[in-house]
Amino acid sequence: MKRTIAKASRGMKFDPDFGSARQAGKAIRAGVISSGELVRHVFGRIKKHNEKINAFVTLNERQALRLARRADEALARGETHGPLHGLPIVIKDQFRTAGLCTTCGFRELENYIPGENAVAVQRLLDAGAIIVGKTNTPVGASDIQTYNRLAGTTGNPWDTARTAGGSTGGGAAALAAGLGFLELGSDLAGSIRTPSNFCGTCGHKPSLHLVPFQGAIPPLPSAVDQRIDQEELNDLAVVGPMSRWAEDLMLELSIIAGPAPAKAAAYRLRLPGPRKTSLAEYKVGFVTDDPFSPVHPRIKSIISDAIGALRKEGVKVKEGWPAGIVFSDIFDIYFSLLAAYVSQDPVFTDSVIEMMKLLFFMPYGDTQRRFVEGLTMTHSNWTKLSIQRLKSRLVWQEYFKTFDAFLMPANCVTAFAHNHERNMWGRIIEAPDKLRYYVEAFKWISPATLAGLPATVIPAGKTQANLPVGIQIIGPYMEDATTLDLAVKMEKILGGFTPPPGF
């Protein structure tokens, strides 16, 4: 099949490799390409390219082709199954999928086949999407690299010797390689934003509690009744959309957002629209660097260039953190609460905690001590830190009375070489400018996560080594449409997604 398929009668062109999900949906509905043709095309690309990057844990070819045939038959009758009718998508292996193995990297889940879908998965299927496969994730979705003993290591399509990021690394790699049109990801420690940044794709961390987390792992299926709304226990993590093009993030978010089933009897979703109509109307703040987590010079330069491009378009920009936001303090609070959150994860056993306590002498012992203390935090201390968490949101909300959004790096480094030393705390990232400790790589995701704010990452440029660099756009709580609208408008002047060489 040619890369660009055209139907002269409608004058419509569509790229089945790297086109957007919106374009794919229009092409299917217009008869430019059938769902069956597109699904077969995607599986052809998976067979050709996946061996290079190892993005998938499980493929769903037989069922996907059967569903595509039904989608085409329905369309022939004048029926559509929803806004994603017949669209091939991928799902992070953290989310339960009925009839498909779901492991989240755990060896004890090697043969686990759920009987029902996670809430967000079901919403995508109800909108007509077709799952082509489950994408790789680290054990328990608990690393900024993607690897496990069941499925192996996922490589970055831009350089397979480097990580695709984590924990939605398999999904970002699949999108970058043209192996599906949308991904369902999650984000607690940058698990949507870091892979999107490293792979040159787009990702959106929604406002906290906007999308139900119900049906995600961990906890292990044996540890919790599947009918329980896990959102009631959640103070940091979110479920969100990933794509190649910014316009698709809002499409997916509009489908998966909304109250969990237990609350749907009383609650309805009504997100406010974007704050502005044109790009020039926006007023944004920004930082390109901070001594607490120094940004690689080339990343800083690319972010600065993006700010300059906005300024040329008439956008009002102002540098500096909001008054009351101290990056180091924000990260300290976040890191302690992160530890408390992941303490449910079977990865953190009592023996592991004891081992970590013995490593306090390491150069970043204070940071590690804070994490270990968080793993065993009392409810009283959790409440005190949670008050600080909510205070940080108030500071940002005051700031957003004047500004519409805030721009910053997504990470202080680009995709780095695979490093799977057993002790995560002993890992060193060999960035071109200097050596960095592992924890450095995800400090820049903490301000938005702590405050529960929406944060969108889109491509902004590339380094001399041809590695992608993204920019992070954060906005007011529950005003996700503003960061997503700004992302679409910025993408037009920054260039957007470009395919990795060889794919």
Image (cartoon, rainbow, N blue to C red):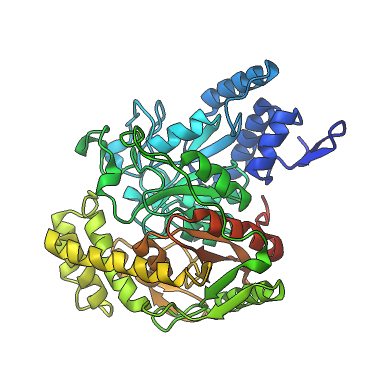
Image quadrant holding the N terminus, namely: top right
Q: Residue at the location (46% across, 54% down)?
A: 192
The image shows residue 96, relative to residue 459, as above or below, that is above
Q: Is residue 308 left or right of residue 389?
A: right
Residue furthest bottom in the image: 291
Residue 401 visible in this rendered orientation of the protein: yes
Q: Position of residue 304 (x, y in %)?
A: 60, 78
Q: Nearer the viewer, residue 482 or 12?
A: 482
| Residue 116 location, quadrant | top left
Q: Is residue 452 left or right of residue 53?
A: left
The image shows residue 404, relative to residue 503, as above or below, that is below
Residue 466 visible in this rendered orientation of the protein: no
Q: Nearer the viewer, residue 159 or 191?
A: 191
Q: Residue at the location (60% across, 47% down)?
A: 248
| Residue 41 location, quadrant | top right
Q: Residue at the location (33% across, 49% down)?
A: 139
Q: Nearer the viewer, residue 449 or 61?
A: 449
Q: Position of residue 141 (x, y in %)?
A: 36, 50
Q: Nearer the viewer, residue 283 or 379?
A: 283
Q: Position of residue 401 (x, y in %)?
A: 47, 69
The image shows residue 32, relative to residue 410, as above or below, that is above
Q: Position of residue 84 (x, y in %)?
A: 59, 34
Q: Is residue 210 left or right of residue 314?
A: left
Q: Residue at the location (66% across, 60% down)?
A: 489
The image shows residue 387, relative to residue 81, as above or below, that is below
Q: Is residue 63 left or right of residue 5?
A: left
Residue furthest right in the image: 8
Q: How many marks?
A: 0
